[in-house]
Structures are given as structure tokens and as C-alpha cells.
Amino acid sequence: MARRKKIYEGKAKILYEGPEPGTIVQYFKDDATAFNAEKKAVIEGKGVLNNRLSEYFMTGLNQIGVPTHFIKSLNMREQLCKSCEIVPLEIIVRNYAAGTMSKRLGIDEGTQLPRPIVEYCLKDDSLGDPLVSEEHIAAFGWASQQDMEDILSLALRVNDFLTGIMYAVGIRLVDFKIEVGRVYDGDFQRLVVADEISPDSCRLWDIETGQKLDKDVFRRDLGNLTDAYTEVAQRLGVMPKTSTPITKPTLIN
Ligand code: CDP
């Protein structure tokens, strides 16, 4: 049987050619990596949870008029998306200090920021995705001034949307990362939210207890990652409370 063509394999996903021109299929793997892939594991069920959660967030964004690459879910691990040209930036929005911001600036994790702060990192694993300024982005032509205005507006709208739906289920959205892509429509190009939105790319803390419900559980060995992601999915009502895809992580190096 003809196998569809693999376009790219990343750390957590595989992209295949889609059934029609201008589409791709995004397959969510169970692989987890941290610290620029120095720490790796296969966590059974993670891909299924992230596929479902990303579908939920992207569908909601599409419905409120924030354009995304998401078209529809195909099965437990795959979704059909518009193919786009990824802007080589990781766009991070922070509401509370954590992670590298806390380390870099000496601000205690969990400190509320005076307003959402947007940061840009260059998407380059070999350099460890370094923080870059808008000066770098303009000078090296990674995105135009108009792109940067659109990116900022997308990032803040995603932040408002995600903050609200998380708050409603007792979860604090500490920070998150998005990627954006260019979609061409004849002679026009527009930017859309691409890649994924999942607990792999957000920091999510229980509002009452401060319990971490995101990839820091894996990065910092705080327990079972699938349990944490299942908790998020169940609170959001995207996974029945009875399902228990719970398994221990297997370290592969
Ligand atoms: O996560 P880490 O401490 O390495 O970096 P950060 O700059 O504090 O990350 C901010 C947010 O972006 C966190 O929610 C990360 O999970 C997310 N992020 C990501 O998804 N992918 C990256 N390559 C870097 C950060």
C-alpha cells in the first residue's frame, strides 16, 4: 500500500503530505524531550492527549476569529492542517515569571508580571533557540514590521483566550509558546497560528495548589506526565473522566 510522504520529523510530531495540495497531516508522537533534547522519554498516551488538546484550543481560536492552520481532526493522533511556511521564531507570552525568565532576570517563579510580556526566540535547535530582539528580527529579515504587528496581535489574542478558558477550570496560564506560519491565498499572505498548543508548550499551574500540570512535570521529574495532561483534558471536558491512559514513562537515555 502506498505510504504517504513524510515531509519532516520533529521531536514530538511528524508532518506528512496532506490529501490535497496546501494541506499537511500532523501526527503527534509519544516522545517527550527537554533541555534541547538532552532528556528524552517515550510517554505512552502523550501524543493522543496533545492531539486532542491542540484540536480543542485551535478550534476555539478559529471560532473567535483568530486564524490557525488547523482544519480538522483525523483520528486519535492525526490532524489535517493548512500547510504554511513557518516563521523561524518561537513566540513566548508570559503572565507570571517562570523558567528562563526567572533565571535570566532573577525574578521568583510565580511572580505576577505587570502585564503580559512577549518574547521572541530564534527557532534553531543547534543554537538552543536564543532570545532575539525585534532589531535582530528586522535586520536579519526573519519577519517584516507588518508581520511583527500581526504576530503581537495574534499572540495577545491567544493569551486572552487561553487565560480565560484555563481560569474557568481552575488553572493559571503562566506562559506559553506559539509558532506562526504564512498561508498564501493567491497573491495574499496571512499569518496563522501553527504547530500545536498543548501542555508541552504551556506552563499550567493549579490555581489552588500550584500543582504543575505541564511539561515541567517531565523536565523536573515531578511525577507522571500523562496524569497531569489527563487532568487538564478532563477539566476542560475534552476527555471523559473515566478514561485512564496512565502509564509510567520509559526513559530511553
Ligand atoms: O521552558 P524553558 O524554561 O526552557 O523556557 P522558557 O523560555 O521559560 O519557556 C516559556 C514557555 O514556552 C514554556 O511554557 C515552555 O514550555 C514554552 N517553550 C516551548 O514550548 N518550546 C520551546 N522551545 C521553548 C519554550
Image: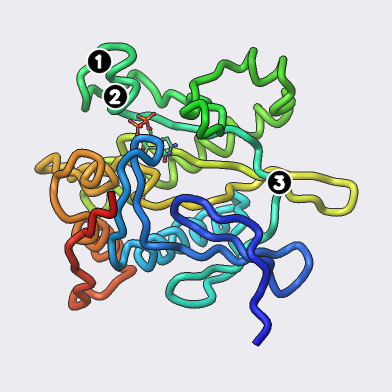
Q: Amino acid at mark 3?
A: Glu
Front residue of 37/29: it is 37
Residue 125 in the image: above or below residue 97: below
| Identity of the residue drawn at 28% across and 54% down | 252
Q: CA distance from mark 1 to mark 3?
A: 35 Å
Outermost residue to the bottom: 1
Q: CA distance from mark 2 to mark 3?
A: 31 Å
Left or right: 95 with respect to 194? left
Q: Secondary structure at mark 1?
A: loop
Q: CA distance from mark 1 to mark 2?
A: 7 Å
> Looking at the image, in which quadrant does ligand 1 appear?
top left
Q: In this rendering, which labeled residue sits more in front, label 1 or label 3?
A: 3
Q: Residues within 10 Å of mark 1 (few under 14, many from 20)?
A: some
- Residue 131 on image: x %, y %: 49, 21
| Identity of the residue drawn at 51% across and 62% down | 59
Residues marked 1 and 2 touching at CB (< 8 Å):
yes
* Color style of the picture: rainbow
Residues marked 2 and 3 touching at CB (< 8 Å):
no
| Identity of the residue drawn at 48% across and 77% down | 75
Q: Secondary structure at mark 3?
A: strand
| Identity of the residue drawn at 28% across and 49% down | 253
On-image quarter of the N terminus: bottom right
- Residue 232 on image: x %, y %: 26, 57
Q: Amino acid at mark 1?
A: Ile
Per the rendering, the mark at residue 107 is: 1
Quarter residue 159 falls in: top left
Q: Which residue is mark 2?
A: 97
Q: Which residue is mark 3?
A: 85
